Amino acid sequence: MRICVFEDQKSSDLYPMAMTRPTCELKCGHTLLWQKIARNFEDIEICFFVRDFLADVYRDKVPGAVNDGEKLTGTDLLFINGRWLMGKGELARTGDEHVGLCEGAVAYIRVKASTLEAYKGQPLDQLIETLKERLPNTQVKARMINYPWDLINYNPDAIQEDFEAQNRQGIHCTLPRTTELLGSEGNIYIAPDAEI
């Protein structure tokens, strides 16, 4: 199985922030959108499909292949829209072939390698549309980043989710006697090498 994070036609709605970076490279909370996807599928290969003029620069920034058509063959694929602000466990690793739609936009597509063989060589945007027409569609709830202000609106929850995902908490350094903590130590992380 392979994860393919892709950009759709709504990237222009995220201008100016998405003019020089893929939509999955936008940050909400402490991490980038693609990093939130990747942490749900840590042991699975990930690749990216972005606008062509961004591909050369983006290849140097991410761990997976970028705009490599060979990554669309040979194994089952899980296409995930790069605008999805994915929380922990929002999408299962396995399941039947289908398309997950959120307000008309493709949030994800789960497809078998055998199905993909029939559409080998199609450009990605055409492949996405073909699969949307041919596979069963399911309406799903997903926090899609449609406009720049969505990043602001979702930011408080994303900060909390990122903090919890790091699985680090507590105070691991010496605090001055005059320090006063408000709230639980479980909601704080201070590194051992921090100086206060």
Image: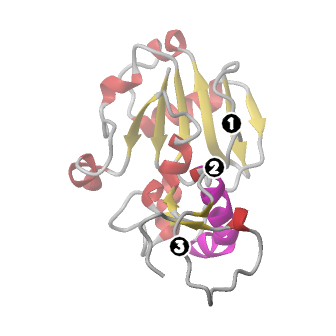
Residue topped by disc 1:
91
Quick check: marks 1 and 2 in contact, CB under 8 Å?
Answer: yes
Q: Label 2 crowding class (10 Å Cα cut-off): few <14, some 14-19, many 20+?
A: many
Q: Is residue 160 above or below residue 6?
A: below
In the rendering, at what x and y percent does residue 69 appear? 32, 29
**Residue in the picture at 69% in, 20% down:** 95
Q: Report, in whole angstroms, how far the alpha carbon at label 1 lies from the one at label 3.
A: 41 Å
Q: Nearer the viewer, residue 71 or 60?
A: 60
Label located before the other in sequence (1 or 3): 1
Q: Which mark is residue 174?
A: 3
Would you say the magenta stretch is mainly helix, strand or loop? helix
Q: Report, in whole angstroms, how far the alpha carbon at label 1 lies from the one at label 2.
A: 8 Å
Say left or right for 103 vs 10: right
In the rendering, at what x and y percent does residue 152 appear? 62, 75
Q: Which residues are magenta?
A: 148-165
Q: Residue furthest front?
A: 177
Residue topped by disc 2:
86
Q: Residue furthest top?
A: 114
Given the image, on which type of amino acid does mark 3 rest? Thr
In the rendering, at what x and y percent does residue 121 appear? 35, 23
Q: For the residue labelled by badge 3, is the local secondary structure a helix, a strand or a loop?
A: loop
Q: For the residue labelled by badge 2, is the local secondary structure a helix, a strand or a loop?
A: loop
Q: Label 1 crowding class (10 Å Cα cut-off): few <14, some 14-19, many 20+?
A: some
Per the image, is 183 magenta?
no
Given the image, on which type of amino acid does mark 1 rest? Leu
Q: Colour scheme in the image?
A: secondary structure
**Residue in the picture at 55% in, 40% down:** 80
In the rendering, at what x and y percent does residue 1 appear? 50, 20
Q: Nearer the viewer, residue 49 or 166?
A: 166
